[in-house]
Image (tube, helix red, strand yellow):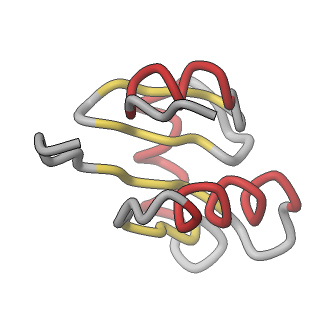
Amino acid sequence: MDNKKIIKVYSSPACPYCLALKKFLKKYNFEFEDIDVSKDKKYIDELMEKSGQMGVPVIEINGEIIVGFDREKICKILGIKE
């Protein structure tokens, strides 16, 4: 995993899937920007613009959007072998 991945996680503190996704990324030592959509409306606007969704989690990996904690897709993009 030598090529750097830019990862953003749009989440909220009350979302169990968000917590699971962040725990998963930490398990594999991926750094990510955690964007708490509950703190500022601009993040919700950004989330809607990128994904067409208001629900979280949404993860962005090098510009590719994944809605929800889609473990299989995330593993494929990040090269994780479980």
Left or right? Give the position of 68 relative to 44: right
* Residue 20 at x, y percent in the picture: 77, 58
Q: Residue at x 67, y 53 (%)?
A: 21
Q: Residue at x 44, y 27 (%)?
A: 65
| x and y percentages locating residue 11 in the rendered image | 64, 60
In the drawing, does residue 13 fall left or right of residue 3? right
Q: Foreground residue, 8 or 72?
A: 72
- Which quadrant of the figure contains the N terminus? top left
Residue 14: quarter of image: bottom right
Return the x and y of residue 69 as percentages of the image width and height. 71, 37
Residue 12: x, y in percent? 71, 67
Up-down: is 28 above or below 13? above
**Which residue is situated farthest in the front direction here?**
81
Residue at (41%, 46%) from the top-left corner? 46
Q: Is residue 7 above or below residue 65?
A: below
Q: Look at the picture and state if 21 lies above or below 50.
A: below
Q: In the displayed structure, would residue 23 be above or below residue 28?
A: below
Out of 30 and 60, give the one closest to the viewer: 30
The quarter in which the C terminus is drawn is top right
Q: In percent of the image, x 34 and y 50: which residue is there?
A: 7
